[in-house]
Image: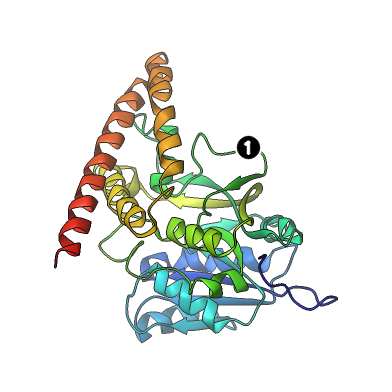
Amino acid sequence: MSPQQPPEGRPETLGVVVCTYTEERLDQVVDAVASVRRQTRAPDRVLVVVDGDEELAGTVGAALPGEEILCLGRNSGVSVARNRGVAALDTDLVAFLDDDAVARPAWLAELVGPLADPRVMGVSGSSEGIFGRRHPAWLPDEFLWTVGVSWRGMPTEPARIRNFYGGCAVVRRSVFEAVDGFATDIGHREGRVGGGEEADFCLRASRAHPGDWFLFAPSAVVGHRVPPARLTLRYFLRRCFDEGVMKRQVSARLKDGALGAERQFALRLPAAAGRYLRTPSRRPAAGGVLLGVLAVLAGLLRGSVDTWTGGRR
């Protein structure tokens, strides 16, 4: 059954949720909201969700006069923030933009266009890196997902995908409500950098709406800031490890087929390592491939142990 659409003749309304959690990104969230306000397809509502206390919400509100602000009261994680944001809006479509991203003017138009097909549940776009310092030679292009940037191997033309990237996406409200939003016990939050909430959400949505799909629209582009702190080997290994933990948890929840995309990704890595070894300036990236794989495998093992011990309690 395809997602519910508005009555015939009424255009679909569109809201945008921007979540923020720290005063350190105050200037960035102002830029993010400004980029939403410059869209060629103007949103009907824009909501800034402050994943923090009233003091932070007051600071954000003062920097964004006239904008809707929703304060969660404490840091609860991105899944809770997005869920609360969707619940506070009344629009048919809800787009998500990270607070450290800047959307190109046609971003919303390019995201929403494919939803003319009622079988499309949601659309994700491209994330181009705005690097705070030089891109490290050891960081493989295939692992740019660790810093929230579109990575080598993603489609270059519109294509069906398993799951969207939550910092640059739009989803139908009816789909969101059918699966009760994002799982709140996984995903990015204070002290944890691993993801998994988007894969979990989209897999559940696909099972609730068999025959429908999510789409990748590479022309829907945002620029994503990558600070120097995320361009360290320590962050890279932690991000890969946490991703392994979360993906094992998602697999345990949803069973067969949950990690099919990851298996396809892994099969391409030996060729990637070989390509880097043949390019003198990028040889360190071959080591990055190996370290990334080992960190993800360690995370998968840790996730398996956590799942097994949790099931025995």
Horizontal and vertical percent position of residue 101: 52, 57
Count of labels in the image: 1
Residue 12 in the figure: left or right of residue 51 = right
Q: Is residue 294 above or below residue 43?
A: above
Q: Would you say residue 184 is visible in this rendering?
A: yes
Kind of element beneath mark 1: loop
Q: Which three-letter amino acid code belongs to the residue tagged 1?
A: Thr
Q: Would you say residue 166 is visible in this rendering?
A: no
Q: Quadrant of the N terminus?
A: bottom right
Q: Which residue is nearer to you in this view: 228 or 289?
A: 289
Q: What residue sits 28% from the left and 47% below the top?
A: 235
Q: Quadrant of residue 234?
A: top left
Q: Quadrant of residue 102?
A: bottom right
Q: What residue sits 21% from the left and 42% below the top?
A: 298
Residue 276 in the figure: left or right of residue 37 = left
Q: Which residue is nearer to you in this view: 138 or 146?
A: 146
Q: What residue sits 71% from the left and 75% below the top?
A: 13
Horizontal and vertical percent position of residue 41: 74, 65
Q: Which residue is nearer to you in this view: 237 or 302?
A: 302
Identify the residue position indicated by label 1 in the image.
156
Q: Is residue 65 above or below residue 4?
A: below
Q: What residue sits 58% from the left and 59% below the top?
A: 169
Horizontal and vertical percent position of residue 93: 65, 71
Horizontal and vertical percent position of residue 88: 54, 83
Q: Quadrant of the C terminus?
A: bottom left
Q: Is residue 189 above or below residue 230?
A: below
Q: Residues within 10 Å of mark 1 (few under 14, many from 20)?
A: few
What colour scheme was applied to this rendering of the protein? rainbow
Residue 312 in the figure: left or right of residue 115 = left
